[in-house]
Amino acid sequence: GSPVWIACARASSAARARRLEAAGAQVLKLSSGPGGVDVRRLCRELGRRGVRSLLVAGGGETAAAFLRARCVDDVVTFVAPSILGGRHAVPMVGGRGAARVRDAIRLQWRSLRRVGQAIMLHGRVHGTG
């Protein structure tokens, strides 16, 4: 199967990196700033290593970092038959976001599919091909 890549800051625990590597993961230690790992550098490094497709798993801030770095071609998201939310809910995409609709990242829908009780939406980020 495909390798599991884990990106972390250079200052991250060496012992933890060794444990992840022993479990079969590829660990990339990269420069980082206040927002975490430099996502553009991560994408360039993965590309240099032959990675052409990447599943990014994380929360809203991780999604925002990849979108902000323009490292996203496709978005796949699920809509479940449950309503969550509230003033303190975690958003799907964090960061600053777009203040106006015209500044929003646009998707071109590719597919919509039912998966169990959920709906899977697949869209291509407008302008990426």
Image (cartoon, rainbow, N blue to C red):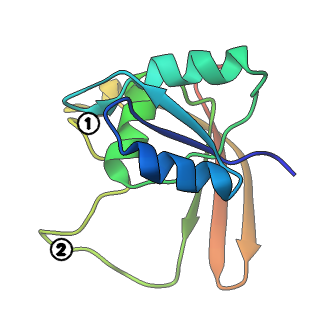
Between 63 and 109, the residue placed more toward the observer is 63
Mark positioned earlier in the residue sequence (2 or 1): 2
The residue type indicated by label 1 comes to: Gly
Lateral position of residue 115 relative to residue 76, left or right: right
Q: Amino acid at mark 2?
A: Gly
Q: Which mark is residue 30?
A: none
Q: Position of residue 18 (x, y in %)?
A: 54, 48
Image quadrant where residue 52 sits: top right
Residue furthest to the left: 87
Residue assigned mark 1: 97
| Residue 71 visible, this orientation | yes
Residue at image point 36% right, 31% down: 104
Q: Is residue 86 above or below residue 76?
A: below
Q: Where is the C terminus found, in terms of image quarters?
A: top right
Q: Tag 1: Cα neighbours inside 10 Å, few (<14), some, or many (≥20)? A: few
| Count of marks overlaid on the render | 2
Q: Which residue is mark 2?
A: 86
Asked whether the residues under the numbered discs 2 and 1 touch, taking CB atoms below 8 Å apart as contact, a structural biologist would say: no
Q: Position of residue 118 (x, y in %)?
A: 62, 77
